[in-house]
Amino acid sequence: MAHLILVRHGKSAWNATGQWTGWTDIELNEDGIAEAKRAGKVIADIEVHHAHVSDLKRAKQTLDHINESLGKDIETKIDPALRERHYGIYTGKNKWQVKEEVGDAEFQKIRRGWDHPIPEGESLKDVYVRVVPYFEKYILSDLKKGKNTLIVAHGNSLRALMKKLDNISDAAICDLEVGLGEVHCYSFDKEGRVIGKEIRASNPNKGKI
């Protein structure tokens, strides 16, 4: 059996102000550092063999603090395939102001829909198209070999992967939230099938930030 640990980065300065961040390279704030350290503590009982992380600062900093908490330096691959969704024309805008402008139904489609287009940006389906092949090419074979693997990424890149792992429908994916600093731990058998899942750290404010 092997573990796949999914960690969403901790809170960034733009998360704190409600701005859509996407590919903008914003650093963690103090709350985010604390969330990252907590993530390390809750997986301390698992020997992590490999890590994969987005190339954006907030994800890499989260992994740095996880390493610090664990007292080790996990062998790591950094790749832009694990980046957050590109929010296009909404990048940098306050999401709650956008909600007031476009209404609840449209806002939910923009924020959590599967294939809702954003001008100059990506849909969740677009993110899925880059994240899932990366998982299948670089991670699944290690899980089949019993290697425990950590992914530190973003709300939507993790949602895209969890859609695959949990067999979530296109319609139901809009209900999935992954909070800042959350830790989701999957168990895999040697054939690469998911055989269990637990949430080791949750965020009571998910969906509100």
Image (spheres, rainbow, N blue to C red):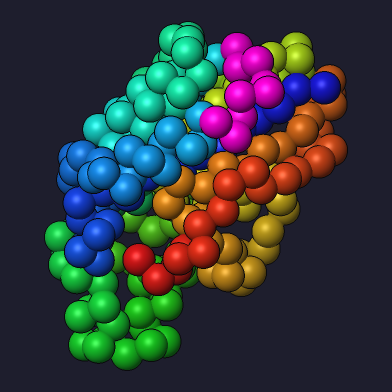
Q: Quadrant of the C terminus?
A: bottom left
Report whether 17 appears left or right of 48: left
Q: Position of residue 111 (x, y in %)?
A: 38, 69
Secondary structure mainly formed by the magenta segment = loop
Q: Residue at x 72, y 45 (%)?
A: 198
Q: Residue at x 45, y 66 (%)?
A: 205
Q: Position of residue 132 (x, y in %)?
A: 55, 37
Q: How many marks?
A: 0
Q: Quadrant of the N terminus?
A: top right
Report whether 6 appears left or right of 25: right
Relative to 208, residue 167 above or below: above
Report whether 70 appears left or right of 170: left
Relative to 100, residue 18 above or below: above
Q: Which residues are magenta?
A: 41-49
Residue 132 visible (yes or no): no
- Indicate yes or no whether the magenta region holds residue 48: yes
Comparing 85 with 182, the one in front is: 182
Relative to 198, residue 49 above or below: above
Comparing 114 with 98, the one in front is: 98
Relative to 145, residue 206 above or below: below
Comparing 177 with 183, the one in front is: 183
- Indicate yes or no whether the magenta region holds residue 59: no
Comparing 67 with 184, the one in front is: 67
Q: Residue at x 42, y 87 (%)?
A: 105
Q: Position of residue 44 (x, y in %)?
A: 61, 24
